[in-house]
Image (cartoon, helix red, strand yellow):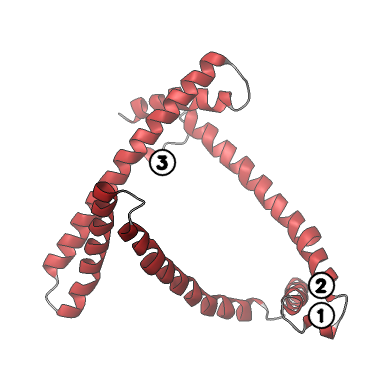
Amino acid sequence: MNTLIAIVGLVAGVPILLSSFAEIPVISDLAQEFQRWGIILAGFSTFLGVLNLTFVNANALRRRKHTGQVIEPVVVLVMLWGLVLTGVFFGQTHPAYDFVFENVLKPLSASGFSMLAFFIASAAYRAFRVRNVDAAILLVCGCLVMLANIPFGEQLWSDLPFVSDWIMRIINGSAMKGIVIGGAIGAIATALKVLVGVERSHLRG
């Protein structure tokens, strides 16, 4: 079975890969067809994910006895199926559908990201301890960039915004480009290993 799955991945992946490098009508049409199949499979996978989330929370709800332990699965199930049914029967432009995004999802997302600020501050405190030359450079660059982004930073030193911009564009930009290039090479190598069947860890259940 694993060999069959690897063959299917190879047959579907090679045309999509080739269509990115060459304009061959037959290959392009085949790649578009496989991509349409991928969209259909993604839809079914999303439906299975909804069912799995429902079963997991329903089982958790059945096992829990105290009222405080029941709230979380109930909220998940109500929000999940409420949003699904609203989108199915009334469409994604219905005010109730928009209400969930504007008044529930966005505030919760903002609250979640705001909580990360405390963890970032803690991590920055640990990272900015000067133990060696690298940590000292990180501390100096971090302080310069942070000072340049506060209202009175320019009052401390008029050239501070230019220094911060140079750090972000030259030093940080060069490092990020190297990381992106390295990640792209790694992704290509992993994709080729998956296509030719060398990498099969994703087939293990």
Mark earlier in primary sequence (3, 2)? 2
Left or right of 122? Residue 74 is left
106 versus 67 height, above or below? above
* Three-letter code for the amino acid on which mark 1 is drawn: Glu
**Image marks 1 and 2: residues in contact by CB distance under 8 Å:** yes
Q: Which residue is mark 3?
A: 201
Q: Is residue 173 left or right of residue 76?
A: right
Mark 3 or 2, which is nearer the eye? Answer: 2
Check disc 1 and report the residue beneath it.
154
Residue at disc 2, secondary structure? helix
- In the rendered image, residue 159, in percent from the top left (x then y), is placed at 88, 75
Does dot 1 land on a helix, a strand or a loop? helix
Residue position for label 2: 161
Residue under the image location 20 percent in, 67 percent down: 74
How far separated are the C-alphas under marks 1 and 2? 7 Å
- Name which residue lies at 54% across and 32% down: 192
Of marks 1 and 3, which one's residue comes earlier in the chain?
1
Q: Quadrant of residue 161?
A: bottom right
Query: Residue type at mark 2?
Result: Pro
User: Looking at the image, can residue 139 be seen?
Assistant: yes
Q: How many neighbours does mark 3 have within 10 angstroms: few (below 14), some (14-19), or many (20 or more)?
A: few
Pick the residue in front: 67 or 123: 67
User: Toward the viewer: 60 or 114?
Assistant: 114
Pick the quarter of the image with the C terminus.
top left
Residue drawn at 72 percent across, 75 percent down: 149
The amino acid type of the residue labelled 3 equals Ser
Give the residue furthest to the top. Answer: 26
The answer to whether 1 appears left or right of 193 in the picture is: left
Among the two numbered marks 1 and 2 on one chain, the one whose residue lies closer to the N terminus = 1
Q: Which mark is residue 45?
A: none
Residue mark closest to the camera, 1 vs 3 = 1
Question: Residue 98's spot in the image, x, y percent?
Answer: 37, 59
